[in-house]
Structures are given as structure tokens and as C-alpha cells.
Amino acid sequence: MNDRLRLTVLGTGRLGITHAACMASLGFDVLGVDTDARKVGQLNAGHLPIYEPGLRDLLRAGLDSGRLTFTTSYPQAAAFGDVHFICAGTPAQPGSDHADLSQVHGCVAALAPLLDRPCLVAGKSTVPVGTARRLAAELAGACEGVELAWNPEFLREGSAIADTLAPDRIVAGVTSRRAEGILRQVYAGPIAGGTPFFATGLETAELAKVAANAFLATKISFINAMAEVCEAAGGNVRVLSEILGADPRIGSGFLRPGLGFGGGCLPKDIRAFMARAADLEAGEALGFLREVDAINLRRRARAANLASELAGGDLAGVPICVLGAAFKPGSDDVRDSPALDVAQILYGMGARVTVYDPAALANARRACPELGYAATMAKAAQDAYVVLLLTEWPEFAGLRPGDLASMVARRNIVDGRNVLDPALWRAAGWNYGALGMAMTPPPASRSAVRRSTTGRGHGGSG
Ligand code: UGA
């Protein structure tokens, strides 16, 4: 194997393009491989088929440097690569929670018979635990010196480049010192920058990814469960979240209450994790994730009901403005988007829904053609009876009550991401509803009175 490793990246979705461009930026020669000839042509011409801040420039820099190219040819990939990264998608199987591994298996099946020299095949895709062991067995029949490792990816959409070049940790599931050494060579830059490197077995590496996503989902659903209680009891979940987050054992990350999690990863990963645990007869261990999922989905129904309450209880024919379609800001991804799901629920309740999003309109229109769309926020808000803020893009989070007042027919707003200042909006004559706050706060909650009289934050009663 060369001193200067040559890398292939099999699968050019979000993960693959990001990984390929980042590895080229670190100085490696990289060949991206995809069976979709149109996509390969686009990428070689410097066109990025997805929205990811900074990635188009990095892609073009890689192409211009000559270190990055894309191909449809597996024979070329087999001849080129010292390390082959599997970056294929693992969506849910139709009608099931189990992951569909056909693309991952497809990569290995196409590559294995062509390998004629020692190399490392390193999986990055999110897979059910046990997959790597099976793939290693498949590769065992390939040429001598071909090995499998699992090297899960933890990147987030919207900060994919930083997450790849300076990750929180690197996990290398390996079965030999040699494989560990090769991955240490690939990630020498981030390791030198202080990123911890965990060498582990294949199963632990696979679990590291799904366990992390399950924990993040659980944290979000925990605060959203507290939001439900706050709504019932007259508490304020935003303040509660700050108080909880101030405890370093809990931490404030992923404790933002609101419409909950969506996207192509967290929802499908927790379901696939439960399905895999059940296969392993360890289903009971992950029973709580069923509740995490249910809490998350209940937030969507609650947001729609809040809009209905603000509109007087009947949404039939009512014009509604939905701000946000992406599953989170900084992305054009609408896969399992909470915002779009709420828009559809409202549509199902008879509302006339108009959606605006700064980046995800085209994808939203493709996914939900029945909804109305507007090219600007002002057009979406025109004559609306209720405005719902469902994805916290900065231009929505920075809204002031006066910005929409002259456009809407009625001043009702649902703050689905808890980013607006309720006092400001109420003072400007808006009915303000948020997830995790009672619609009308009790005039002087007993705990607030007690706090002010004792001057301490313990509510006076111990
Ligand atoms: C997630 C993980 O954060 C990554 O570490 C992982 O690599 C990735 O999945 C993956 O499996 O590939 P991503 O889906 O890009 O990344 O999005 P997140 O930033 O995790 O947000 C997920 C959802 O949770 C969004 O809908 C967001 O709005 C929501 N969220 C996040 C909250 O509702 N509250 C929070 O406090 C944080």
C-alpha cells in the first residue's frame, strides 16, 4: 500500500459528496463512485445536487486541484483505491422499520470481485449492528489482504464540512492493527488537531452511531415531554430547559423544546435500532424509544391544534401561512420534516395552507404538491388568519411583530420552535401560542409569587 493513500468514496449522496470533497481538501487523491451517470456528470462539472453551506466551493476546489474526480466505473475504483469508503444510503425498507441495506450490499458486491491487491473497505453508512461482520465475511472471499472496517460518520446537515474536518471523535471499528493504522493515516490531520480516536470492534463502532442518534432523539423528546406538562400546568418550558441545561451533567445541547426532530436520520435510525434490537431479542432494552418517537410525533399534532384554537376551532377554508419546510434551518432537506408534516395536517383539517422556506421550496413542492407555496414570506403571510413558524431559519427567528402585521388578516402566531419573544408579540396585539407554554398564562403563578417573596429560587417551601 502506498505512503500516499488513494481513496474511493462509494455512493455520492450527502455523506459521500461531503466525505469525498473533504478528503480531497486534506490532500488525498479521491475518486467518487456512483451508478447514476447523470449525477456523476453533474459533480464532475462542479454542480452540487444538494444544499450544504460551503460544499460547492470545496467540491470545485477539489476538481480544480485535480485531486477529486467522479466516475461510474467500479473497475476504475478497484484499481484506484487503497481505502474504499462505503457511503451508500440506508433508508427504511418500504412498509417496515428495518433499514434497507441493498445499496450497501450493492457497493460491496460490485467491488469485491474486482479487487486484486490489498486494501481496506471502510463502511461509513449507518447500519444495523451485525452488518459489518456479514460484509467482512463477504469480503473474505476476495483477494488476499482485503479487509473491512467500520468508521461511522457523525456529520450534521448544515455543518457537514466542519463535522468532517474537525469531528468530535473518530470511531474505527477494526479487526486488525493494520486496519487501525490505515484509518489513523487517513485521519492524521484531525487527530493531530486533537480529535479523539477510538479503535474498537466492528459491533461497537456500528452501535456508536445509532446509540448517539438515539440519545439525541431521547434528549429532544425529554424536553418536549416536559413541554406537554408545562402546557398542562402553566409552566414555561423555555425557562425549564435553560435551568436543566445549566447542570453540566445534563448539558444544554439538544434540549431546545419545540416541534421536535425530523430529517433523514434521527426518526428512521431510532426505528431501525428498535427493529434490530427486536431481531436480537433485546427489544425490551429499547422499548423507551417507542415513547421517544410518540412524544416527537405528538408535537406535530399539538402545533396543528394550536393553530386551530387560534383560528376559533375550525380550519375549513381558513388561510394559513407556514414558515418553514426544511426539517431544520441550513438545509433544503424535507425528509420527515416536522414543518411539512404540520402543513399537511393543517391541509387535512381543511385549511388553505401557503408555505414559504428560503431553501427547501422545490423539494417541498415535489414532496407535497397539494400544498400552496409562495416565493416570499410576505406573499405567504398575505391575508393569513394564522402564521406558524415551524423551522427556525434566522429570517424567521428574527421576525418582529410589525414585519407581518400589515399583511395578515388576523394577528395569530404559533411559535413552533420557541424562538420569538412572547411579551413583544403579545404587546403588539398578537395572539401568541407556543409549544410548551400555556396559551394564557395564569395571572400570577404561585411559584412566581413565592419566588419573589422569599428572594430565592426554591419556591419557599423546600
Ligand atoms: C443527526 C445527528 O445530529 C448527527 O450527529 C448524525 O451524524 C446525523 O443525524 C446522521 O445520522 O447522519 P441531522 O439529521 O443533520 O444530524 O440533524 P440534527 O442537527 O441532529 O437535528 C435533527 C432534528 O432535531 C432537527 O429536526 C432539529 O430541528 C431537531 N432538534 C435538534 C430539536 O428539535 N431540538 C434540539 O434541541 C435539537
Image (tube, rainbow, N blue to C red):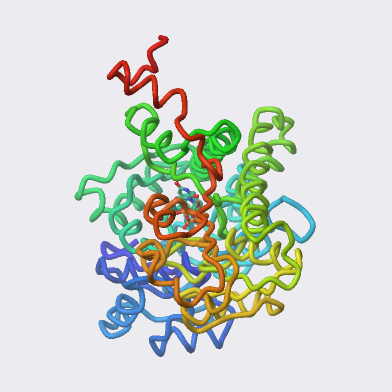
- Residue ID at (43%, 33%): 240
- Residue ID at (79%, 57%): 95
Tell me where residue 428 sits by quadrant. Answer: bottom left
Along the line of sight, the residue nearer the viewer: 384 or 169: 384
Whether residue 203 is visible, yes or no, is: no
Q: Is residue 329 above or below residue 80?
A: above
Whether residue 357 is visible, yes or no, is: yes
Q: Is residue 139 above or below residue 461?
A: below
In the image, is 111 to the left or to the right of 452? right
Along the line of sight, the residue nearer the viewer: 10 or 47: 47
At which x and y percent is residue 11?
A: 53, 70
- Residue ID at (74%, 61%): 314
Say which quadrant the C terminus sits in: top left
Residue, far right:
95
At which x and y percent is residue 204?
A: 51, 37
Q: Is residue 263 above or below residue 60?
A: above
At which x and y percent is residue 227?
A: 54, 38
At which x and y percent is residue 2?
A: 30, 64
In the image, is 294 to the left or to the right of 82? right
- So how many labels did they put on this image? 0
Say which quadrant the N terminus sits in: bottom left
Along the line of sight, the residue nearer the viewer: 118 or 10: 10
Along the line of sight, the residue nearer the viewer: 412 or 443: 443
- Residue ID at (72%, 65%): 315
